Amino acid sequence: NLVGLKRRGVKRSDITALRAAFQMLAQGEGTFQDRARRLGDETESDYVREIVAFVLGDSDRSFLTPGG
């Protein structure tokens, strides 16, 4: 949450990037995996890269996504 990020000293630019990343993952064009890949290619935020690595990482579990 925003308060926790601020308390940890996360830069405003990273907070903005995280908000945009979550919006893109939730509502962007293409499949969830495609959006995650595109996000990883476009971001400069290490926080967002960490999310992308988690989403795209090998796992036997899947994400619950709309329509699927």
Image (spheres, rainbow, N blue to C red):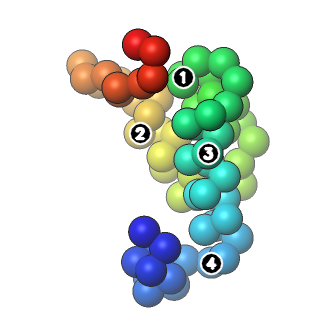
Q: Position of residue 40 (x, y in %)?
A: 64, 39
Sequence-wise, which precedes: disc 4 or disc 3? 4
Sequence-wise, which precedes: disc 3 or disc 2? 3
Mark 2: few/some/many CA within 10 Å (<14, 14-19, 20+):
few
Q: Nearer the viewer, mark 4 or mark 3?
A: 3
Give the residue at x 41% y 13%: 68
Mark 3 sits on what residue? 23
Q: Is residue 40 visible?
A: no
Mark 1 sits on what residue? 33
> What's the CA distance linking mark 4 and mark 1?
27 Å
* Quadrant that contains the N terminus: bottom left
> What's the CA distance linking mark 3 and mark 2?
17 Å
> What's the CA distance linking mark 4 and mark 3?
19 Å
- Cβ atoms at labels 1 and 2 below 8 Å apart: no
Give the residue at x 71% y 54%: 44
Sequence-wise, which precedes: disc 4 or disc 1? 4
Mark 2 sits on what residue? 54
Q: Nearer the viewer, mark 3 or mark 2?
A: 3
Asked if 54 appears above or below 62 in the picture, the reply is below
User: Camera-side residue: 6 or 67?
Assistant: 67
> What's the CA distance linking mark 1 and mark 2?
11 Å
> What's the CA distance linking mark 3 and mark 1?
14 Å
